[in-house]
Amino acid sequence: MTPARRRPRALSARSLRRAAAAGSAAVVLASLVACVPGESAGPERGTQSAAPEVIGDVPAELESYYMQEVVWDSCEDSYLCASIEVPLDYSNPRDNSIELEVILSEAGGTAEGTILVNPGGPGGSGYDTVLESLEGVTTSRLRDDFNILGFDPRGVGRSTPVDCLTDEELDASRNETFDPSTDAGFEEARANAADYAAQCAEESGDLLGFVDTASAARDMDILRAVAGDSKLNYLGFSYGTFLGATYAELFPKTVGRMVLDGGIDPSASNEEITLGQARAFEKAIRAYVEDCLTSSNCPLSGTVDDAVETIRDLIASVEVSPMTAADGRTVTASTFVSGFILPLYNDANWPALTQALSSALRGDPTTILMLADLGAEREEDGSYASNSFEVFSAVNCLDYPMETDRTQMDLDAAELEAASPTLGRFLAYGGLTCEAWPHEPTGEPHRIAAEGAAPILVLGTTGDPATPYEWSQALAGQLDSAVLVTWEAEGHTAYGRGNQCIADAVDDYFIDGTVPQDGLVCS
């Protein structure tokens, strides 16, 4: 759950939302299902089914899912993979089922247990995280002691997927531009959103109504059992913190060791989340600019205010006159802002943003387009490596009631622009995305206490642009057993990206069960 989850002015909300979601999954342009250590070594090659003592007390209609025989096969050169069956609809579990694809990276040493990687989104692939970027999001110490299990949540990627657009249609959608602040633009954006919703319904069928976070959290309990674990240890990043907190609320007695990094405030409304992200991204832009101005190759000059104004003027010029990249593709404001946002997720990538802005100020948007494509997971041949673009809207339209009153959306848009003069207008009118969605929302923002759960570790980064630090504070304050660890730094999330203090806090917690001191600050 990353920024720009709303229909923006003068750009496609879906493309901006997707670029933001990619930041949580690709924090390396810059979570884990596990047993309590010692209780299980995790899956092995061959066919396995969960023991009754692992399954616990589950409804009779779900027993077949918890007790299913799972075939773990060698895959991807050095991993184990399996397909896990889960109910499409937990209220009628015997009607239809879907499949989740999982991948296991075996521990480097003797495994103390099994751990699941969820990178965020919604729409991020835990399968890809294990396969492609595990070293970037976990330490070698953790990988030596634990098996790491990644999964594609329902609707995502290799699991039974949501489908809405062809690759060519997705290219076009990322470049769409509207101005919902005008009557004509509002109606055009509304019609476009209705067409998109209808196409998603046609291509995805019944699945589209069951990709909510609560259902995904229930899936994780089945994954816990088929992995042979009586407790769930979990590390979730960004949206993964909301998924993990939801699991803790539903299954407090089976929470093992849980780390929630880059917290989402589960009590915040869709509109409150948007406003919080607008403020946080404006803060991140200023932090980047302040750093850039100390560099000899910075294309910006003057004061921080002067430099930020230069960026705003550049974006405004693209709104009026789209640019052309070296490959001949048109770069509209939608794509430009998506590329601009992505490096803000990790201050290690600020030099890439400097390079992109330097070129764009000379009239060449090629590097900005490259960043936007990276965020959208677009390959050089024009194909897309994932369906996370579609999943993002599908999950959020179920998880959150959206504001659809035009008058209120206009007021919200003005508040967003005041909070972020650079990006605020691009985050407005998000209610249009879900107004015509074929399924009513099933979620409602509320405080999550998860009373009875084992201690939960919440990590917050003070300069996080996508999940503002205040959200981690709020999440830790709501969870009955949570402790908060703070990293004083810029960028999105902490573990795998932070300093030794952060690494030790997380690793000691997972490996030794040592709960950090509440309020620990790593700087």
Image (spheres, rainbow, N blue to C red):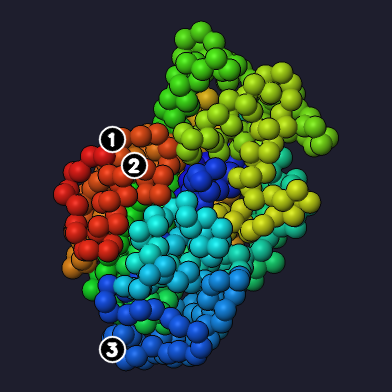
Label 2 crowd (10 A; few <14 / some 14-19 / many >=20): some
Residue closest to the far front: 109
* Residue carrying label 3: 53
The reply to whether residue 209 is in sight is no
Toward which corner of the image does residue 387 lie, by quadrant?
A: bottom right
The reply to whether residue 323 is in sight is yes
Choose the circle earlier in sequence order: 2 or 1. Answer: 2
- SS type, badge 1: loop
Q: Quadrant of the C terminus?
A: top left
Q: For this rendering, which residue is in front, 503 or 50?
A: 503
* Residue carrying label 1: 523
* Residue 432 at x, y percent in the picture: 58, 46
- SS type, badge 2: loop
Choose the circle earlier in sequence order: 3 or 2. Answer: 3
Q: Residue at 23% across / 39% down in the picture?
A: 521
Residue 339: which disc? Answer: none
Residue closest to the far top: 302
